[in-house]
Image (tube, rainbow, N blue to C red):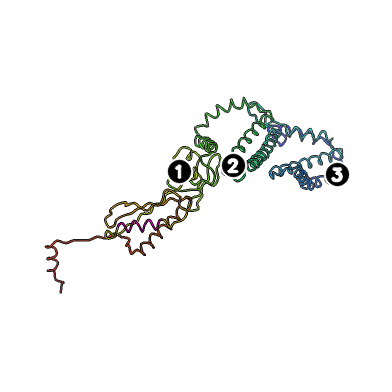
């Protein structure tokens, strides 16, 4: 199969253009003009793109991704226009014939969606609309941020504001995708009808993804968990760093970053210490000898607990007799701190305070001991045993 036959099968528009060009008589002057204009077109692509970006910035556009897209698009248009002009001036083909050939290539149907042909023009249209939607999303987020800060001032909650901005971003992108497909001529009603059947088929395979997506929308909408909150998840204290539509990034006390599926936060019991300015209880257990003065021990433990900083106004430090152990009397010392993220630091400070207060009060921290009591017959038998000679 020849190249022309292959192109006729897979891309008839390109084969038609090549057949048109194959019948053209190239003159020496035309070839020379094309040889001059082609490098100039390529060299002028970047300068013209930068010029378009500079003009767009002067008009108030500051989105870097949109500016880069405008620069690239301007460069491609400049190259095509200069090459078309070179072919026209060189009397190879007219500029109109050149543009018609380009449009035939761009409008050729690559595949179909909901009985709508999809071409390069369709894809480019959707891409342009999505870029504009992204820029519009940033503009709306900026407007919401400025308006909220202007009205609330220092009272604004940055975590709540960030969650609202994320919801706006996803909503605008979804609307932009719908507008882009509709602008490109895709029948959304037919697409949704066909997609409903398709969704049922892939729904079972994407249960977790869909579940996390819906859970993410619920968590962001309810605002019970926000970036910066201190949570207790599965017995671990973590700080929320970023919240996405599918997962949430948290940081542990060991400075490890974990990615939690949003369904885990929406369906399981999660303790949020930051929701109502909650406090965290720190418990430290210590054992003293049975010979110790219990009233003195309680007073010393309470004094040690009161030296720890960052404590909540209430409840106050508490000392409880926890258990009578085999080798010690065990006490539990509890304090409530206002910053749950300092859990390990405050617990360490409390243990050190107990140690030094016990040292000053001459109270012994008990350790496991085993006393063996021997009866009279056993003791008498041991005394009669003589070492071997």
Q: Which residue is mark 2?
A: 161
Pointers 3 and 2 in contact (C-beta within 8 Å): no
Q: Which residue is mark 1?
A: 271
Q: Which residue is mark 3?
A: 33
What secondary structure is found at the residue carrying circle 2? helix
Residue 382 position, x and y percent, is 14, 66
What secondary structure is found at the residue carrying circle 3? helix
Spatial CA distance of label 1 from label 2 is 22 Å
Precedes in sequence: disc 1 or disc 3: 3
Pick the front one: 288 or 45: 288
Quarter occupied by residue 331:
bottom left
- Answer above or below: position of 47 versus 293: above
Spatial CA distance of label 1 from label 3 is 74 Å
Spatial CA distance of label 3 from label 2 is 59 Å
**Which residue ends up furthest to the bottom in the rendered image?**
389
- Neighbor class of circle 1 (other Cα within 10 Å; few <14, some 14-19, many 20+) is some
Pick the front one: 250 or 318: 318
Residue 79 position, x and y percent, is 78, 42
Q: Is residue 356 left or right of residue 144?
A: left
Q: Is residue 238 left or right of residue 150?
A: left
The quarter of the picture where the N terminus appears is top right
What secondary structure is found at the residue carrying circle 1? strand
Magenta-tinted stretch? 294-305
Residue 144 position, x and y percent, is 64, 39
Foreground mark, 1 or 3, reads 1
Residue 129 position, x and y percent, is 69, 35
- Neighbor class of circle 2 (other Cα within 10 Å; few <14, some 14-19, many 20+) is some
Secondary structure mostly taken by the magenta-highlighted segment of the chain:
helix
């Amino acid at each position: 199969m020849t190249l022309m036959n292959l192109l006729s099968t897979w891309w008839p528009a390109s084969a038609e253009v090549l057949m048109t060009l194959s019948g053209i008589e190239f003159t020496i002057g035309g070839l020379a003009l094309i040889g001059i204009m082609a490098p100039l077109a390529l060299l002028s692509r970047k300068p013209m793109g930068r010029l378009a970006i500079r003009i767009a910035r002067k008009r108030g556009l500051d989105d870097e991704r949109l500016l880069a897209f405008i620069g690239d698009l301007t460069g491609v248009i400049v190259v095509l226009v200069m090459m078309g002009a070179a072919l026209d001036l060189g009397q190879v083909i007219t500029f109109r014939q050149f543009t018609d050939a380009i449009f035939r290539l761009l409008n050729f149907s690559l595949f179909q969606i909901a009985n709508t042909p999809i071409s390069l023009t369709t894809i480019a249209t959707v891409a342009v609309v999505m870029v504009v939607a992204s820029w519009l999303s940033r503009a709306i987020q900026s407007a919401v941020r400025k308006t909220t800060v202007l009205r609330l001032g220092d009272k604004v909650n940055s975590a709540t504001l960030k969650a609202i901005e994320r919801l706006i971003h996803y909503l605008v992108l979804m609307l932009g995708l719908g507008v882009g497909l509709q602008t490109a001529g895709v029948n959304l009603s037919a697409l949704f009808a066909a997609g409903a059947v398709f969704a049922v088929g892939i729904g079972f395979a994407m249960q977790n993804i869909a579940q996390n997506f819906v859970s993410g929308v619920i968590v962001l909408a309810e605002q019970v968990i926000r970036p910066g909150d201190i949570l207790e998840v599965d017995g671990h204290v973590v700080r929320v760093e970023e919240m996405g539509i599918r997962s949430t990034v948290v940081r542990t006390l060991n400075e490890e970053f974990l990615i939690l599926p949003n369904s885990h936060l929406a369906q399981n019991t999660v303790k949020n210490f930051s929701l109502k300015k909650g406090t965290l209880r720190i418990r430290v257990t210590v054992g003293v000898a049975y010979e110790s003065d219990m009233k003195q021990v309680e007073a010393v433990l309470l004094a040690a607990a009161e030296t720890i900083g960052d404590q909540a106004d209430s409840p106050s430090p508490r000392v409880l007799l926890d258990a009578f152990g085999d080798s010690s009397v065990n006490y539990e010392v509890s304090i409530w701190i206002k910053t749950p993220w300092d859990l390990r630091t405050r617990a360490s400070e409390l243990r050190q305070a107990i140690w030094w207060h016990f040292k000053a009060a001459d109270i012994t921290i008990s350790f496991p001991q085993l006393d063996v009591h021997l009866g009279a017959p056993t003791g008498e038998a041991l005394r009669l045993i003589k070492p071997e000679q």
